[in-house]
Image (spheres, helix red, strand yellow):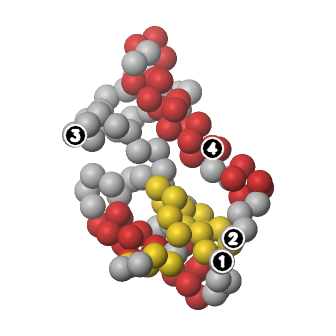
Amino acid sequence: NELGMKVNMIITDYSMPGMTGYDLLKKIKESEKLKDIPVVIMSSENIPSRISRCLEDGAEHFFLKPVQLSDVNKLKPHLLRSKLINFCKFQPSFLDWSPDAGNLCQSCV
């Protein structure tokens, strides 16, 4: 944010040196600035309890590797919604938008 960059989504592996994708997810969801960013976790290990825990604690999706095209297609609505919201912020004719109220124009709902 300080650099004027917008993060639409965070995609991470579950197994990383120093922390797991679950640990990263928890840190993101505990952050006031980051908590609304969708988080996608991926792993080559099919461990149902791990997958469930990540999804229950806020991951938008959990993909098994190798990631399939159908998995990638599941991300499109999140990215398109973000683009539409950003578009509507700068289009007065489209919106009844207020950053404080958090409301969206009808196109973004």
- Residue 53 screen position, x and y as percent: 51, 81
Q: Nearer the viewer, mark 4 or mark 2?
A: 2
Judge the density around disc 1: few (<14), some (14-19), many (≥20) Cα neighbours within 10 Å: few
In the image, 25: left or right of 44?
A: left
Q: Residue furthest front?
A: 17
> Quick check: marks 4 and 3 in contact, CB under 8 Å?
no
Label drawn at residue 77: 4
Alpha carbon separation for disc pair 1 and 2:
5 Å
What residue lies at 55% left-to-right and 38% top-to-bottom? 81
According to the picture, the residue beneath numbered tag 1 turns out to be 44
Q: Residue at x 47, y 24 (%)?
A: 87
**Residue at 57% over, 46% down:** 78
Instruction: For marks 3 and 2, give the CA distance.
Output: 34 Å
The answer for how far apart the CA atoms under marks 4 and 3 are is 26 Å
Mark nearest the camera among 4 and 1 is 1
Residue that badge 3 annotates? 2
Amino acid carrying mark 4 in the image: Pro
Tag 1: amino acid: Ser
Tell me how far mark 4 sits from mark 2, CA to CA: 21 Å
Number of other residues with Cα within 10 Å of mark 4, as a class: few under 14, some 14 to 19, many 20 or more? few
* Tag 2: amino acid: Lys
Q: Secondary structure at mark 2?
A: loop
